[in-house]
């Protein structure tokens, strides 16, 4: 059986077009992971952090009211993350992407968080570090210290961070290509 080179190239091109980049895969329903929400250790040695109400107030201040914040807790207390859950709709995805873009445009997205995290990781007692110019700043309006929050759209590589949120343990992985046709058929 003879196979033409053109036929092989067409199949390869089709497979490349169908290939999904890991960056295109997101968690469904859409979620934003907000990092650096750990505040301090209490007298019992457990971490406290920004709660759902404080995060909802922060989101309202910047004009994002659709998402529902859920603080992440573990054995040592607050894990330093808040998950913002959005509805399983195209509007929910668009709102999540808008918040993702807000953090990214303020240089507070995934890349910047990884840089900050790597800078502190490896130092003695790095688990206890929650101060520093990339983690805390003085708000000029109220002259109080505030956490510098970092946020990004949850992707497949973040699935283990969603385990503390019971509703998201069984979340799905979808691509944007999967979501847009499905939402168009329901409208």
Image (tube, rainbow, N blue to C red):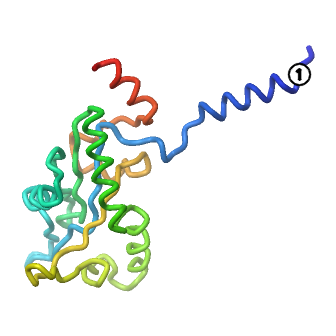
Residue at 24% x, 51% y is 164
Tell me if 177 is positioned left or right of 58 in this view.
Answer: right
Name the residue tied to disc 1: 4
- In-front residue for pair 115/171: 115
The residue positioned 31% from the left and 79% from the top of the image is 134
Q: Residue furthest right?
A: 2
Q: Is residue 40 left or right of residue 6?
A: left
Q: Residues within 10 Å of mark 1 (few under 14, many from 20)?
A: few
Left or right relative to 143: residue 156: right
Nearer to the camera, 43 or 184: 184
Q: How many numbered discs sit on the rendered protein?
A: 1
The quadrant where residue 104 appears: bottom left
Residue 172 screen position, x and y as percent: 36, 35
| Helix, strand or loop under label 1 | loop
Residue 155: give x, y in percent of width and height.
40, 47
**In this view, 143 is above or below 71:** below
Q: Residue at x 16, y 44 (%)?
A: 66
Q: Is residue 62 above or below residue 129?
A: above
């Amino acid at each position: 059986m003879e196979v033409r080179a053109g036929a092989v190239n067409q199949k390869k091109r089709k497979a490349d077009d169908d290939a999904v980049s890991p960056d295109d895969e997101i968690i469904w329903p859409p979620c934003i992971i907000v990092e650096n929400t750990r505040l301090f250790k209490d007298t019992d040695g457990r971490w406290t952090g920004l709660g759902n109400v404080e995060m909802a107030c922060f989101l309202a201040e910047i004009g994002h009211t659709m998402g529902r914040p859920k603080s992440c807790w573990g054995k040592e207390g607050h894990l330093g993350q808040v998950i913002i859950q959005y509805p399983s709709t195209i509007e929910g995805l668009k709102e999540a992407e808008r918040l993702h873009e807000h953090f990214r445009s303020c240089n507070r997205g995934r890349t910047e968080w990884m840089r900050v995290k790597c800078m502190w990781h490896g130092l003695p007692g790095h688990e206890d570090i929650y101060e520093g110019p990339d983690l805390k700043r003085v708000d000029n309006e109220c002259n109080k210290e505030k956490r510098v929050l970092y946020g990004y759209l949850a992707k497949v590589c973040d699935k283990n961070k969603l385990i503390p949120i019971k509703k998201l343990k069984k979340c799905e992985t979808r691509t944007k290509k999967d979501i847009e046709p499905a939402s168009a058929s329901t409208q």
